[in-house]
Amino acid sequence: MKLDMTLKSIRKLNSWTQEQLADRVGLKRSLIGAYEEGRAEPKIETLLAFSRLFNMSVDDLLAGQMKGIKSSNVETERLAGKKLRILVVPVDPKTNKESVSLVPIKAAAGYLGGYGDMDFIEALPQFSLPIPEISSEETRRVFQIEGDSMLPFLPGSYLISSYIQDWNYIKTGELYVFLTQDRGVVFKRAKNCIVETGEVELISDNLAYEPYKIHIEDLLEVWKVEGNIQFDLSQKGVSDSVVSRLDVLQREVRALRSVLEKNVA
């Protein structure tokens, strides 16, 4: 097994410390040192994590076949969706066209483990979207959301989303459904920080929720939200959101007034 040399070489190509590599695959730094020195052998789950991170097959990883990999090339190909991102898409046997899969709330937790499994995807509800505004040429999925972090999008709403192959095209300020390794399926507004830090900042429209950043290595799929279907027409969630925002604004105004009064005094 040549994993020790491969691991150390690729880590240095990316200018990562052992601690940084350990953080990216969820291990302790001491284990990375043990792997690089040949004192321990990783479990299959760890090999798969290295495989995803380095955009290499497990066979090449174990054989020490780096094939001239450069960190910049790896990053570019991963962003563009040319490495280890195979989208499973069901096809309607009658029309030979792609079906639209529905991921309801009850299936969202399983989606993280089954997004690449054709049996799982085909078991989801399938349908077509004969709507003139929605092109049939793009791959789409519908995600049902829960929680109130993106009000006025109400819990239980269905988001019509199109697949984003190239993550370079994630646009700041627009709405996306992200599949992440740690948080599963999340619906947020994006801020593209890939060039600066290799991350995407995920922002809630509900100001009660703090934004957070996801590194591209923790992203699995990205879907751009194009439309919304909801059946709760009470709009209670919208009213609550407005009240919440007004409360925040009032607090900010009071704080500003206090500062001004102190300056005048």
Image: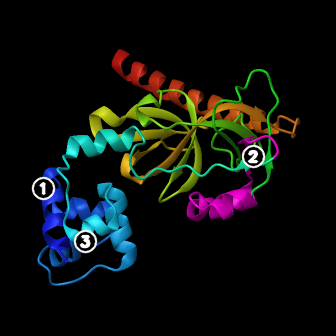
Residue type marked 3? Leu
Give me the residue at 74% from left, 37% from top. 240
The image shows residue 131 at horizontal and vertical percentages of 81, 26
Name which residue lies at 12% across and 55% down.
12
The Cα–Cα distance between marks 2 and 1, rounded to whole angstroms, is 45 Å
Type of the residue with mark 2 = Pro
Q: Is residue 90 above or below residue 97?
A: below
Residue 176 x/y as whole percent: 57, 37
Q: Nearer the viewer, mark 3 or mark 1?
A: 3
Q: Nearer the viewer, residue 141 or 210?
A: 141
The part of the chain drawn in magenta is 94-123
Give the residue pinned by disc 2: 155
Residue displayed at 29% across by 43% down? 75
Which quarter of the rendering shows the C terminus? top left
Q: Is residue 198 visible?
A: no
Q: Quadrant of the N terminus?
A: bottom left
